Amino acid sequence: MRAAPSTVSPLITVRDVHFVYPAGGGVGTPALAGLDLDIAPGECLAIIGGNGSGKSTLAKHLNALLLPTAGEVRVDGRDPEGAWLARQRVGMVFEHPDNQIVAAIVEEDVAFGCENLGLPSAEIRARVDRALRVVGLEQLRRHPPHQLSGGQKQRVAIAGVLAMRPRCLVLDEATSMLDPLGQQEVMEIAFRLCRDESLALVLITHAMEEAARADRIVVLAQGRIVLQGSPAEVFAREDELRRLRLEPPELVRLGRALARDGVAVPPGALTIDPLVEALIAGP
């Protein structure tokens, strides 16, 4: 991934967005409160926050699964009142892979969105072939999805999104139900797509280790952005994160503990390699 240049026009703009979940006969529940956000083409953005902070509500606004109570969201400079256009541009993968399976065979599931677009059969076949190749599931194309592992099911979901040729991929807690191997499979594919295919990648996550690999982190609380910046900048605000009941990644905490013991840890170290080098170098 790379930090997107500030001169690039945003792929998605969120302006003064409010959203209230309706309540029968009473006052609704506010979920977003005047939120502003730009997402650039090819950027990897992690959105973190505690339960009820508005993360998933914001995610559903990015492809018009929800529409703002007030304010606006634009995708490719367009108001996505025509929700189908937004869902072509912004694909989503959710937490529970079984809830996303719609067909009895992997390749049919991947083709589902393209068929709804009314594309010619040859075009659908080419898109499905490429999507399965990108996520490494070519050999399982004729398998029933229910026989796959959780990580493989999420890769099927990602392939179905890729076949639609989106410009942005949103993973809404997409690894939270997976074992460590499945988490690694899904995230490696997502980061590779961001890097090699120039897809914008939005990670809605509780996993700080995933957020640490993003270009930028946005922290939500009560439907507002309360912190944002590079991973090193955000995780340096440890006291503020703890007030929000969030913890920096374990490697960041380890680096600070080593620094307190006199090890010359590089500022903003987020991965294991600089910590190992610092330990080898000694105090």
Image (tube, helix red, strand yellow):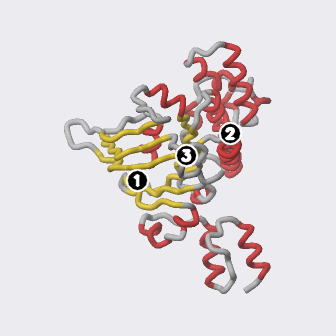
Q: Residue, x 44% and y 43% (percent of image)?
A: 13
Whichever of callouts 2 and 1 sits on the residue coming sooner in the sequence is: 1
146 is higher (above) or lower (below) than 116: below
Q: Which residue is mark 1?
A: 53
Circles 2, 3 touching at the beta carbon (< 8 Å): no
Whichever of callouts 1 and 3 sits on the residue coming sooner in the sequence is: 3
Q: Nearer the viewer, residue 124 or 176?
A: 124
Q: Secondary structure at mark 1?
A: loop
- For marks 1 and 3, give the CA distance: 29 Å
- For marks 2 and 3, give the CA distance: 17 Å
x then y, percent, for residue 116: 55, 18
257 is higher (above) or lower (below) than 199: below
Q: Residue, x 43% and y 33% (percent of image)?
A: 64
Mark 3: which amino acid?
Val
Q: Residue, x 75% and y 73% (percent of image)?
A: 276
x then y, percent, for residue 97: 59, 37
Left or right of 229 in this view: 35: left
The 10 Å Cα crowd at callout 2, few under 14, some 14 to 19, many 20 or more, is: few
Q: Secondary structure at mark 2?
A: loop
Q: Taking the image as drawn, is residue 105 in sight?
A: yes
Mark 2: which amino acid?
Glu
Left or right of 15 in this view: 247: right
Q: Which residue is mark 2?
A: 197
- For marks 2 and 1, give the CA distance: 31 Å
Q: Quadrant of residue 73?
A: top left
Q: Taking the image as drawn, is residue 182 in sight?
A: no
Left or right of 153 in this view: 8: left
